[in-house]
Image (cartoon, rainbow, N blue to C red):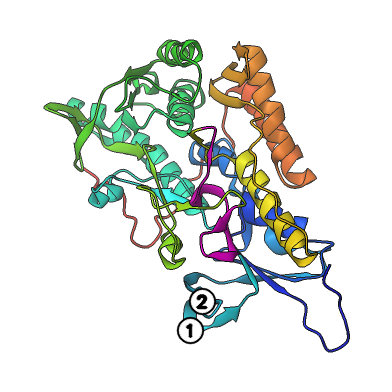
């Protein structure tokens, strides 16, 4: 292992992104004689799997975030920079940051994640926001709650119905969990809050372009999820490719769905930083890494998380938190092994199982050949997500909020925040 001799500089490891992969990599390097610099454009780590619960007023942003500096406060070989990485010069081994700053590296771990993809229709984002950040979640929450306020003011029945119609595009975990939560809030938490509208008449439509929802799960669990959504009052439409989104409607072929609120959960595209790594990319912009997670022809650069296209047993490793954690750990350990003069080890993804919640006391779980649905799967989902949250305060706060919502059917974060700059939402009227 490299020695910290007088006058000798320690190897510099730069990590881009404070998500699951980047944070795990930084922590794994705690006892390795290197200088770790973690760079993120925000000051917090986000527990993204529960982001939809901020969007639906179940949780507050502080329940699922933790300051990165606080998380790494006791790691003496790590420092944190709040900055945005604009590009990487792999020839010079330099990362270009915003405001013209540069930072050099001996090893680089890129874990900058992904954003929602609109399949060539980026103009849809203004009317159909996705969900990847706290800003996205607060914008989505504002649109959701504001829709009922606008419906309350309507004199026209058709317009009122459009305000009370919510369309979720995408039948993956985010889309399903979001769609399952909306009718529960409308018919439970909000039912006594308005005088002119009946929030129980709220319509939620889930559109999936493929033949089924939650296709990563076994067919029987996917069908169970669709049945649960239907029982909750969600209209599930499969083989429904969105062809157009306007300010007042969503189009599926020639079918026009009047709706004033649309949420997008249909796809992801990798961070554009992959374009600067002198590496092959797949159709979603993910970097096609080597088995040890390094970039071809650049063994000092690693890519982990949603940015990495990792194929195992002929299948793409899913872009989920456990995979990102395992990839971040493997990349960091391979840096340590390189410094110690040892051969690197290839990444092997250990699938701990898949979980998805559909609604109150409804979830599905897959653990190899063991398939579970219903209340038991829901309790398992609750436990796993509590365990993965960072910090005791967050775990306790989320547990209390969930308990309060379960007993009272209420939501404690129903604040309509002012729209962020550039996000005006749908026109009123």
Q: Tell me if residue 200 comes above or below residue 32 in the rendering.
A: above
In the image: residue 210, left or right of residue 389: left
How busy is the neighbourhood of tag 2: few (under 14 within 10 Å), some, or many (20 plus)? some
Whether label 1 touches label 2, CB < 8 Å? yes
Residue denoted by label 2: 97
Q: Is residue 123 visible?
A: yes
Q: Which residue is mark 1?
A: 100
Question: Is residue 298 highlighted in magenta?
Answer: yes
Circle 2 SS class:
strand
Q: Name which quarter of the figure residue 232 lies in.
A: top left
Query: What residue do we see at 47% from left, 48% from top?
Result: 132
- Residue pictured at 59% horizontal, 26% vertical: 354
Task: Give the x, y percent position of residue 278.
Answer: 44, 66
Mark 1 packing: few (<14 Cα in 10 Å), some, or many (20+)?
A: few
Q: In the image, residue 289 lies at what x, y percent?
A: 52, 53
Tell me where residue 109 sits by quadrant.
bottom right
Label disc, if present, on residue 170 of the rendered structure: none
Is disc 1 placed on a helix, strand or loop? helix
Residue 10 placement, left or right of 115: right
Residue located 41% across and 59% down the image: 420
Give the magenta range. Answer: 293-313
Q: Is residue 77 left or right of residue 50?
A: right
Residue 416 visible here:
no
Q: Is residue 308 above or below residue 207?
A: below
Q: Nearer the viewer, residue 253 or 296?
A: 296
The reply, left or right, for residue 379 in relation to residue 159 is right
Q: Give the distance between the C-alpha atoms of the residues marked 1 and 2, in whole angstroms.
A: 6 Å
- Relative to 95, is 411 above or below? above
Horizontal and vertical percent position of residue 346: 65, 47
């Amino acid at each position: 292992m490299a020695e910290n001799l007088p006058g000798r500089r320690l190897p510099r490891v730069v990590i881009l992104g404070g998500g699951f992969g980047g944070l795990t990599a930084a922590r794994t390097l705690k006892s390795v004689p290197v200088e770790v610099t973690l760079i993120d454009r925000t000051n917090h780590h986000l527990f993204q799997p529960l982001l939809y619960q901020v969007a639906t007023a179940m949780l507050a942003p502080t329940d699922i975030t933790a300051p990165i500096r606080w998380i790494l406060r006791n790691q003496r070989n790590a420092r944190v920079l709040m900055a945005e990485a604009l590009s990487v010069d792999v020839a010079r081994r330099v990362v270009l940051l915003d405001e013209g700053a540069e930072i050099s590296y001996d090893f680089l771990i890129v874990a900058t994640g992904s954003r929602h993809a609109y399949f060539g229709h980026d103009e849809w984002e203004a009317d159909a926001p996705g969900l990847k950040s706290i800003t996205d979640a607060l914008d989505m929450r504002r649109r959701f709650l504001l829709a009922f306020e606008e419906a309350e003011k309507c004199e026209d029945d058709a317009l009122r119905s459009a305000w009370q119609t919510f369309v979720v595009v995408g039948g993956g975990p985010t889309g399903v969990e979001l769609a399952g939560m909306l009718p529960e809030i409308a018919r439970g938490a909000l039912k006594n809050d308005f005088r002119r509208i009946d929030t129980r008449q709220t319509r939620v439509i889930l559109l999936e372009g493929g033949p089924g929802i939650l296709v990563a799960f076994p067919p029987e669990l996917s069908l169970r999820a669709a049945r649960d959504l239907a029982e909750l009052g969600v209209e599930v439409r499969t083989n429904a490719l969105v062809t157009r989104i306007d300010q007042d409607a969503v189009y599926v072929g020639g079918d026009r769905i009047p709706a004033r609120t649309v949420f997008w959960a249909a796809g992801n595209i990798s961070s554009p930083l992959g374009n600067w790594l002198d590496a092959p990319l797949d159709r979603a912009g993910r970097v096609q890494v080597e088995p040890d997670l390094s970039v071809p022809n650049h063994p000092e650069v690693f890519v982990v998380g949603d940015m990495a296209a990792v194929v195992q047993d002929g299948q793409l490793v899913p872009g989920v938190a456990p995979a990102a954690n395992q990839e971040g750990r493997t990349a960091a350990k391979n840096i340590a092994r390189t410094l110690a003069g040892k051969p690197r080890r290839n990444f092997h993804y250990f699938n701990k199982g898949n979980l998805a919640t559909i609604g109150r006391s409804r979830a599905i779980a897959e653990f190899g050949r063991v398939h579970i649905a219903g209340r038991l799967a829901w309790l398992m989902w609750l436990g796993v997500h509590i365990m993965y949250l960072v910090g005791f305060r967050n775990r306790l706060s989320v547990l209390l909020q969930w308990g309060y919502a379960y007993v009272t059917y209420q939501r404690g974060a129903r604040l309509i925040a002012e729209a962020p700059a550039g996000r005006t939402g749908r026109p009123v009227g």
